Image (cartoon, grey):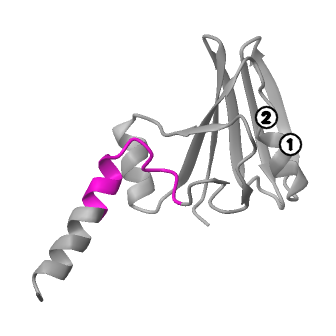
Amino acid sequence: MAIALPTGWWLADTLRWRSPLYCIERPGTLWNGLTPLPSGLTPTCPNSASYRQEVRDGESRVEQYLVPGWQPLAAAETLRAKGYVLLDDELMAPDHYSAFMGKTLPAELHYTAVKQGNQTLITISGAPR
């Protein structure tokens, strides 16, 4: 029994980091529990091994969401309602929006929206909270 408990914990932890939604710590919420997930947003996570390692090491937090059509502000409006202010933004191309948001300076969140086919991929990243 003493060996089974640590082994079970290790296995569960290892499988979490291999799962496709490793970056969504609190399912059904936006930005790790800040608010319930707005309708229309489907959680996903970066495929990047470096992102996966940064999140695992606690160096950063990243959440990704897909939304139908071109809706670059789909999650930004919810963040604004929770006190995050748009500090700087840029439409880098007709299908690539980037912004820095925060409650204080310097910005706490980097928010990007990129058109992918008939969907928008929204990535929110920042320090773990």
Question: What residue does disc 2 label?
Answer: 74
Q: Quadrant of the C terminus?
A: bottom right
Q: Secondary structure at mark 1?
A: helix
Q: Residues within 10 Å of mark 1 (few under 14, many from 20)?
A: some
Q: Residues within 10 Å of mark 2 (few under 14, many from 20)?
A: many
Q: Is residue 20 left or right of residue 78?
A: left
Describe the element under mark 2 as helix, strand or loop. Answer: loop
Q: How many marks?
A: 2
Write the residue at 13% across / 79% down: 4
Q: What residue is pinned by disc 1?
A: 77
Please give the range of residues in magenta.
13-25
The amino acid marked with disc number 1 is Glu
Left or right of 101? Residue 22 is left
Residue located 12% across and 89% down the image: 2
Quadrant, the N terminus: bottom left
The amino acid type found where label 2 is placed reads: Ala
Say whether residue 64 is magenta.
no
Residue found at x 19% / y 81%: 5
Question: Do the residues under discs 1 and 2 have CB atoms within 8 angstroms?
Answer: yes
Q: Is residue 20 left or right of residue 77?
A: left
